[in-house]
Image (cartoon, helix red, strand yellow):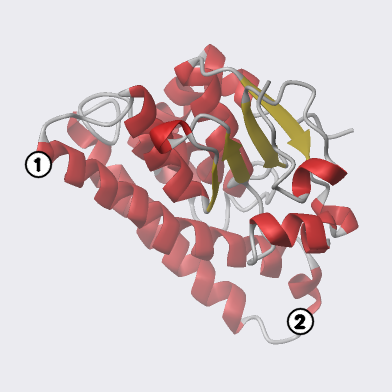
Amino acid sequence: MTDLSQFPIAQRWPAAHPDRLQLYSWPTPNGVKVSIMLEETGLPYEAHAIQIGKNETWTPEFLALNPNGKIPAIIDPNGPGGKPLALFESGAILLYLAEKTGKFLPQDPALRYETIQWVFFQMAAIGPMFGQVGFFHKFAGREFEDKRPLERYSAESRRLLDVLEKRLETRDWIMDDYSIADIATLGWVRNLIGFYGAGDLVAYHTLKNVPAWLERGLARPAVQRGLLIPAAD
């Protein structure tokens, strides 16, 4: 049986199946990237709910795995060379799982890097901008008297949606085939118009291709399962 005792997080959140990939996460737009990917690939894994509302990412055990104190993070007991590998940052985890399984990332070098650039587009632009809209529209930021931050982030989020809208004019997915670029992005668009309730702010109703893409993505059984993992008790 695999020994995970070298990882402090395994003491606080013990593994019932230490031979499986361990996922430490919460069903946020970043967290569900990895659970969706794991469901899509069929890799055996065990999910541990890290309750961000209770600041569990700032515990010493979690920080030993991710010093940045953010979900998601993983431990793969069968990493490179057969040795356990700890990894954080959702984009890095998606790339790792794609390369480990040979799925959802083209083998052709040019297409591979094109896919990676769209993952980075989500990581560097969509995630941060949509998250700021959520803060200033739904959470504490909505009480701010100065509305310029919300206006700025809403306008930038709409611009980013327009980038996606144009990209999807002649294709069903961000690349020709469903890939980690879609997996990285679906949860954020869903969250923007759903949980954040910012559809009107970004004129989502005027878009055609992005809503159709989102509907296709959300119809995938693995996506439907992944969006609920780990279960938010």
Q: Nearer the viewer, residue 148 or 102?
A: 102
Q: Nearer the viewer, residue 121 or 19?
A: 19
Is tag 2's residue or tag 1's residue first in the polypeptide sequence? 1
Q: Which mark is residue 144?
A: 2
Residue 130 drawn at (x, y percent): 54, 59
Residue 201 drawn at (x, y percent): 56, 58
Amino acid at dot 1: Ala
- At label 2, counting other C-alpha atoms closer than 10 Å, the crowd grade (few under 14, some 14-19, many 20 or more) is few
Left or right side of 75 for 216: left
Amino acid at dot 2: Phe
Question: Does residue 69 show up?
Answer: yes
Against 144, residue 31 (above or below) is above
Left or right side of 143 for 179: left
Residue 230 drawn at (x, y percent): 74, 31
Which of labels 2 and 1 is toward the front? 1
**SS state under label 1:** helix
Q: Which mark is residue 110?
A: 1
Left or right side of 8 for 72: left
**SS state under label 2:** loop
Mark 2 touches mark 1? (CB < 8 Å): no
> Residue at 86% of width from left, 54% of height from top?
53
Residue 81 drawn at (x, y percent): 39, 35
Left or right side of 15 for 176: left
Real-space Cα distance between discs 2 and 1? 45 Å
> Residue at 70% of width from left, 47% of height from top?
6
> Residue at 48% of width from left, 37% of height from top?
186
Against 31, residue 179 (above or below) is above
